[in-house]
Image (cartoon, helix red, strand yellow):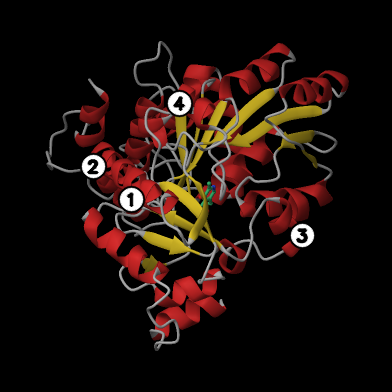
Amino acid sequence: MKFNSICARELREKQEIRPHVLPIYSTSSFSFDSIDQALDIFLGKEKGHVYGRYGNPTIEAVADKIAALETHGLDMEAKALMTSSGMSAISTLFTATLKSEDKVLTQGNVYGGTTELLMTVLAPFGIETIQTNLQDLDMVETLVAKDPTIKMLYFETPSNPAMACVDIEALANIAKKYGRFSAIDNTFCTPYIQQPFKYGVDFIVHSTTKFLNGHGNAITGVIVGRDCEYMEEKVGHVLKLMGTNCNPFDAWLTWNGMKTLSIRMDKQSSNAMQVAQMLEAHTEVGRVNYNGLPSHPDHEIAKKQMRQFGAMLSFELKGCIQTGVDFMRKIRFCTLAPTLGDVDTLVQHPALMSHEAREVRESNGITDGLIRMSVGIEDITDILADLEQALDCKTNKNMPIMQHHKAMVSA
Ligand SMILES: *Cc1c(COP(=O)(O)O)cnc(C)c1O
């Protein structure tokens, strides 16, 4: 089956009762015909379900579909496990693969929650984090070669909010050469745009809350691993005991959202390109960070590993609208919400809404005039018109602020 067909189809085995779409198995446990069958299922001699935290048919259908998409067209299999959120995918992966005195080599600009997890939750358990510039491959190899306790290379590309890219293949090769794990957060791209397994990574995580779901109505995550046995025995074991499992209803919402993945991503990428071009030509806008623009410093790496350039971009204000807050006050059509990947265009102000610590913020180029956008599927003329009026020096920036906008800006 081709990629789009995997997204759209139900892909389930024939059953006695034949619902057209995947049912929600809203049950905490599963019953047995006999004690002998129960024993066989417990011992793994017969396939079956036991208890909802260990496995559930709705959740497994979603996981299997994501594994099929991440390995599509590649000569390999992978095993996916759904989790309760993107953060629980990341925390489950770290706790399953790392132990005290191991180190993670990563970059300063991964998702803020990931950095905080490493620094404040895992560090006290003796798991150390080294942040470096993962674009400097010689430096990465030097660090890995001299320190055998670096157990994992963990990265994100493109990364928030400057859309900086790292070379997946080069990093995965360094990890492989020295027998370490490599893991990537593929949330911004989805397997439709970027397939990290093609370049040799060991693990892929997603906040499926974002583009894979696409409709902003559920919090879910996934871990996909190329070593199916390790995923089942080790990662699955930790997931089960940490209780970081997904719930069937949110899994089902993700299942529904994924059916339109490719059409959404095509439309969002083409809208984002038009937004980026308009912004780049605008006199009130400074730097525009979009991987699809030849002016982006990582355009070439992006072209190598991304099929298209996605929905995410950020830009710097300059001129009459000095700060992100002033700009956000004037936004009328786009939605002010601290998430990404939904079908509506989302505008966010990283300095206020996601990167609170000033020193971290400034070292990653997050100024007060930086705006991040997740471009949606609306008519491009509506998106562009809103940006034009918000950037227009003549329109009054002191007009009344809508109540929910006010709350968001002060959050
Ligand atoms: C949102 C996000 C996460 C965290 O996911 P949750 O589902 O909110 O837990 C992790 N990584 C990236 C890149 C994200 O955008």
Q: Which residue is mark 2?
A: 260
Q: Earlier in the sequence, mark 3 or mark 4?
A: 4
Expressed as whole percent of the image width and height from the top left, the position of residue 286 reads 53, 55
Category of crowding for the residue at label 2, using alpha-carbon neighbours closer than 10 angstroms: few (below 14), some (14–19), many (at least 20): some
What is the secondary structure assignment of the residue under circle 2? loop
Give the position of the N terminus as an image quadrant: top left
Q: Which residue is mark 3?
A: 359
Q: Nearer the viewer, mark 2 or mark 4?
A: 4
Tell whether circle 1 marks a residue whose Cβ is less than 8 angstroms from ligand 1. Answer: no
Q: CA distance from mark 3 to mark 4?
A: 31 Å
Q: Which residue is mark 1?
A: 214
Expressed as whole percent of the image width and height from the top left, the position of residue 6 reads 25, 29
Q: Earlier in the sequence, mark 3 or mark 1?
A: 1
Q: CA distance from mark 2 to mark 4?
A: 24 Å
| Left or right: 178 as drawn, with respect to 82 | right
Residue drawn at point x = 56 percent, y = 29 percent: 203
What is the secondary structure assignment of the residue under circle 1? loop
Q: In the rendered structure, which amino acid carries the disc numbered 1?
A: Gly
Q: Name the residue at the bottom extreme.
A: 400
Q: CA distance from mark 3 to mark 2?
A: 40 Å
Q: Which mark is residue 294?
A: none
Q: CA distance from mark 3 to mark 1?
A: 32 Å
In the depicted structure, whether residue 333 falls above or below residue 75 = below
Is there a contact, CB below 8 Å, between mark 4 and mark 1? no
Is there a contact, CB below 8 Å, between mark 3 and mark 1? no
Residue drawn at point x = 12 percent, y = 41 percent: 20
Q: In the rendered structure, which amino acid carries the disc numbered 3?
A: Glu
